Amino acid sequence: MPLVFLDETWPNQRSSYQTQFIELADSTVEQVRTHSRFYVFETDTHTESTERIRIEATTGAAPWGNILPLLGTVHPDDPAAFANAYNITKNAESSYHGQIEVVYSTQPDPTQLPARVSYGRGALQRAFEGAKAYVLPSGAEDLPGSSAAYPGLAAGDPYPITASNYRPFIPGPVDTVNFRILTVTKNLSLGAWHTYFLAEESYRQAINLTAWAVRGRTFAAGKVYMPDLPSAEEVFDGTTVPQKYMKTTWVFWIDELRGWSLKLLDAGFYELLVPDAPVSGDREIILPTGRPTQPVRLDGHGQQLGAGGVTVYLEYRVRQRAEFADLPISPLPALVP
């Protein structure tokens, strides 16, 4: 056994703080710092290499072996600093003696770092569900219910969009609808990624089942859509302790105005004999003026809408729903100004 003495010495111990900071997962901020602890050693032969001394100091037998802190261990008085370097030096005057410096640095676990978000923008071509007003040739707006521009509209009811012959446009008119793109990046442990991966099909092109909070902004159910599955890259990190983790990126589309459901005007040329009962059969709608030249508004129950009734738009959920709060990137707490 080459070591005949090894113990920590208090002279020269030092700490160094930098004007650099790291945000941790719980939103606390740690100032970057380094600490040095020193150990003196004596060997029973002057020909021992510094590498052999390191091996004996970390894994050798008592009383002098297995004393040196292993790399990756936490500083005894600084839980955010980890041992990441040894500096082993033999004395110039005596090769039997020397000093080991253990350097600790502020290096948090990458999987404990908070998620990062970025906001982009996008646009889609979507069909109009209705108009807020009809613009007369004079340029004045005719609001629903204020005139007979479209018979039977109730006040505040969206105008069905038709040609001047009251026939709907085929295909329907579309417009560019802008939406917000939210991108979230987060390092996940292999266990957290594996848990998500087993349930991934539940999130494929899904909308949020319940309200979802992101950085202090809460989005109502059905307003956030995950258009694609997240990307993930396996990363090996050895700055603190050797470990693998997944560097993931998640993309969401946010449309708070319309959401992600499909809305269609309830209209047709036939009505059910009994409301909400398709088994009852149907009959052609005949107006006092004869057969209609455009689809007649229906009441949401399969029958002709009475005069003055509110136009009904049928809403269809075309995406599956998922609980976004259960994603491994959640929660996404509010930013502190």
Image: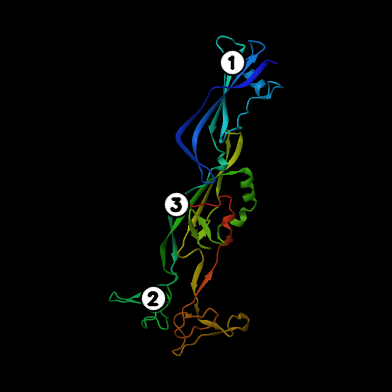
Q: Which residue is mark 2?
A: 163
Check disc 3: other Cα within 10 Å, few if <14, some if 14-19, many if 20+. Answer: few
Q: Earlier in the sequence, mark 1 or mark 2?
A: 1
Q: Amino acid at mark 3?
A: Tyr
Question: In the rendered structure, which disc, 3 or 2, sits on the residue that comes first in sequence?
Answer: 3
Q: Which residue is mark 1?
A: 98
Q: Where, by quadrant of the figure, is residue 257 drawn?
A: bottom left
Quick one: 285 or 321, which is closer to the camera?
Answer: 321
The nearer-to-camera label among 1 and 2 is 1
Please state the horizontal and vertical placement of residue 288, each as a whole percent of the image. 45, 90
Mark 1 and mark 3: span between their CA atoms? 55 Å
Residue 302 horizontal/vertical position (percent): 55, 80
Which residue is found at the position 46% from the left and 78% from the top? 311
User: Which residue has dot 3 on it?
Assistant: 119
Callout 1: SS: strand
- Tell me whether the residue at label 1 lies in contact with that at label 2, contact meaning CB atoms closer than 8 angstroms: no
Q: Nearest the camera: 313 or 108?
A: 108
Q: How many marks?
A: 3
In the image, is residue 34 above or below residue 253? Answer: above
Asked whether, in this view, residue 202 is left or right of residue 309, the answer is: right
Q: Is residue 106 left or right of residue 200?
A: left
Query: Mark 3 and mark 2: span between their CA atoms?
Result: 39 Å
Residue 118 visible, this orientation = yes
Q: Please, is residue 162 above or below residue 119 in the view?
A: below
